[in-house]
Image (cartoon, coloured by chain):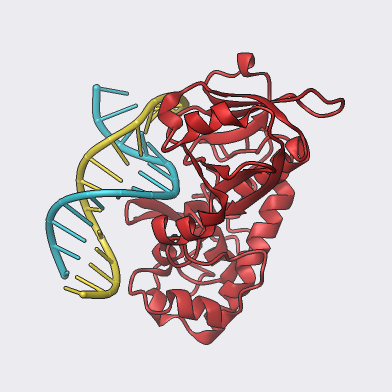
Chain colours: A red, B cyan, C yellow
Amino acid sequence: MPELPEVEIMCRNLARWSLGRPLCQVDVVDSAVDSGGVEEWARKARGRTVGRVWRRGKYAVVELADAEHSLVLHFRMTGKLVAADPERRSSVRIILRLAPEAGRPDCLVFDDARRLGNAWALATAELQDWFETSRKLGPEPWPVHRPAAFWASQLGSIRSPIKVALMRQDRVAGLGNIAASEILWRAGVSPTRQACSLSLEQWDRLAAAVPAFITDTIEREGGDEIAYVNSRGASSHGNPSPFSVYRCDGQPCPRCRAPIERFKQSGRSTFWCAACQEG
DNA sequence: TAACTTGTTTAAAC
DNA sequence: TGTTTAAACAAGTT
């Protein structure tokens, strides 16, 4: 499930693989991925050089050095951007073919098993406004450090549980269901607490937990292909779960050994330790 | 087979 | 009006 850390990794990989290289062809294999302008952009992209690659919330942006429009990707549940042979992938949606270069892959694939992801081609100059106005994204929680006052200001008026508030993309962009549970566990705050009821000390711990979680996750999952968690809670590379509470229900809390519990909030699974996350 | 998975959008409720 | 919740949706896995 690509949340902020995974999208950050994909952007870094994409830059590492493609920055400064001309595109020799772009194939929109599945036209349903196109939420606006992508097929036309693909026709014009031939010969253009990949410029800046950056992230906003859970979106990835690919700029071209000498084109007015950029490619914007959203991965939803199963989307990912990988360096791979498209023939060996079962659910290819877009292929970026680069001019061959020694030491770097020629093919970058937007692979998306459940085909829920989206792509847009948009004027680069209007992207910031598009994210803010059209996609209604709040400010970034990372890498700039956000103090307790920021969190209190963005979320402190919300009456929903803090777990639900953390996932509000219009208040803070990029945190999803996994991040929300993990951050609250690190901060020692109960997911059931109303966001508007948190103490200054709790906002402070939350402010510290967010960059800690994001940085740790990027370090742990960084690599050529994102080590997505599968349904068993173990990563796709066969490693044990990289998370402290997410999908760890029934297992002992890494901090206090009490069993991790699971329940639903707004239709989403929440994982937490009732013993050491204060209500 | 039905339940579960996610972020987003839309509709309904508060 | 603004806020919050619920349902629907995509489609594949368990």
What is the number of callouts on the image?
Answer: 0
Asked if A50 appears above or below A279 in the picture, the reply is: above
The extreme right residue here reads: A102
Residue A265 rendering spot, x and y as whole percentages: 35, 57
Please report the residue visible at 55 percent of the width from the left and 44 percent of the height from the top.
A2
Closer to the camera in the image, A66 or A88: A66
Q: Position of residue A118 (x, y in %)?
A: 46, 38
Q: Residue furthest bottom?
A: A200
Give the image location of residue A46, x and y in percent. 64, 27
Where is residue A141 drawn, in percent x and y?
58, 66
Q: Nearer the viewer, residue B10 or A120?
A: A120
Q: Residue at x 67, y 42 (%)?
A: A66
- In the displayed structure image, the side of residue A156 where residue A230 appears, left or right: right
**In which quadrant of the rendered image does the C terminus of chain A lie?**
bottom left
Quadrant hosting residue A114: top left
Would you say residue A221 is visible in this rendering? no
Give residue A164's quadrant in the image: bottom left
Visible residue check, residue A166: yes
Is A201 on the left or on the right of A105, as rendered? left
- Camera-nearest residue between A263 and C3: C3
Q: Nearer the viewer, residue A252 or A180?
A: A180
User: Which residue shows up at 66% across the image and 45% down it?
Assistant: A11
* A264 is higher (above) or lower (below) than A1: below
- Please name the residue shown 54% across and 61% down the image: A258
State whether residue A204 is above or below residue A115.
below
